[in-house]
Amino acid sequence: MMRQAGRYLPEYREVRSGSSFLGMVHDPARASEVTLQPIRRYGMDAAVIFCDILVPPAAMGQGVDFLEGQGPVLEPAVRSAEDVEGLVDFTATDATGFLGDSIRAVREGLGDERAIIGFCGAPFTVASYMVEGRSSRNFENTKQMMLGEPETFDRLLTRVVDNSIGYLRMQVDAGADVLQVFDSWGGALSADVYRERILPHVERLVSEASGFGVPVILYVNGCHHLLEVMADSGADVLGIDWRIAPREAIERVGDRVALQGNLDPCTLFAPPEVVRAEAKRVLDGFKDQRGYIFNLGSGILPKTPLDSVQALWDTVLDGGLGA
């Protein structure tokens, strides 16, 4: 599940008690522990390393903090060519070595029978956080730079990708078996704009990551209109949200890529018997797809009932689908 290690588990909240979110990310002992917690409880096929897509911007010199009730805040916001050039290129093992240590600790606790999924943010999503300075509904500043200062925006995306490549390589070297690229905000762009302005950067990131010898998953939230563009990225797997029917997704991408998704995370607030039926519906919808990985269509939400999560994984794992 996306956000597999997180706030919905009581054991996570116990480990988190008295620590900030970033404090957890930077502590390999606690980060590896919360990564393993859902595997112990539910038995998924893959552990998603506990980290955040905004670790690279922090390593590039931008202040990053997570404020209760507000989410991530990045200061100062990157709003000019001078700001872009003022960013730092980092060596992953030095600036973000804690993540590599977390992955090695997870491998030790996980054994070799299950996979470890490493990840990074996609170029547009990371850049939008850096430009906006926080989450955004309309991305006014980001789109203003993209349209009004295209060279500056392309330079920012280039620098994000440059630094993400080494960051992903470090994760594979530490033991990650799969890499996922999260484009949380890519759905805010039209297919034409995404193809022209964003896809070349995504293609470069995916190509480099594939060169590390592991499969690459590309997830774009709000991707209904972007499937064909995503399929041209070179990724092995496309992660899709719940807004598109399995049949349509399969018809549009064929056997070019495998698919991952696409249960609405809000389904898990329904009673367990409903969750079982909905999970079965999703599995049936993808049964004819040559490659399929079950996942939610977005991150699991806080306060999700544990009985419903248990019902979900009982249904999926009993169905014989592996990661």
Image: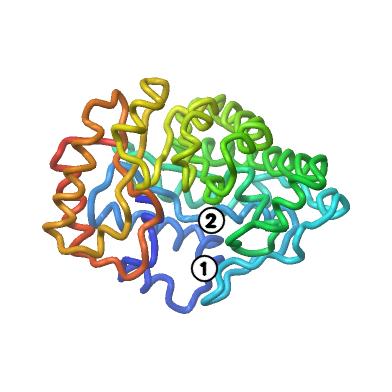
Against 32, is 283 above or below? above
Q: CA distance from mark 2 to mark 1?
A: 9 Å
Instruction: State the scheme by which the image is colored.
Output: rainbow
Residue 101 is situated, as x and y percent measured from the top left of the image, at 52, 50
Dot 2 amino acid type: Asp
Q: For the residue carrying disc 2, how many other residues have a C-alpha within 10 Å: few (<14), some (14-19), or many (20+)?
A: some
Residue nearest the observer in this picture, 15 or 261: 261
Q: For the residue carrying disc 1, how many other residues have a C-alpha within 10 Å: few (<14), some (14-19), or many (20+)?
A: some
- Image quadrant where residue 77 sits: bottom right
Against 59, is 151 above or below? above
Residue 20 is situated, as x and y percent measured from the top left of the image, at 53, 72
Query: Which residue sits at x=32%, y=53%?
Result: 264
User: What secondary structure is marked by label 2?
Assistant: loop
Residue 129 is situated, as x and y percent measured from the top left of the image, at 65, 57
User: What secondary structure is marked by label 1?
Assistant: helix
Please state, as top left, top right, bottom left or bottom right, where the C terminus lies in the image: top left
Dot 1 amino acid type: Phe
Check contact, mark 2 vs mark 1: CB within 8 A.
yes
In this picture, residue 196 sits left or right of residue 214: right
Residue 52's label in the rendered image is: 2
Upstream in sequence: badge 2 or badge 1: 1
Residue 3 is situated, as x and y percent measured from the top left of the image, at 40, 56
Residue 21's label in the rendered image is: 1
Query: Which residue sits at x=18%, y=36%?
Result: 284
Query: Which residue sits at x=23%, y=49%?
Result: 43
- Image quadrant where residue 59 sits: bottom right
Q: Residue furthest bottom?
A: 18
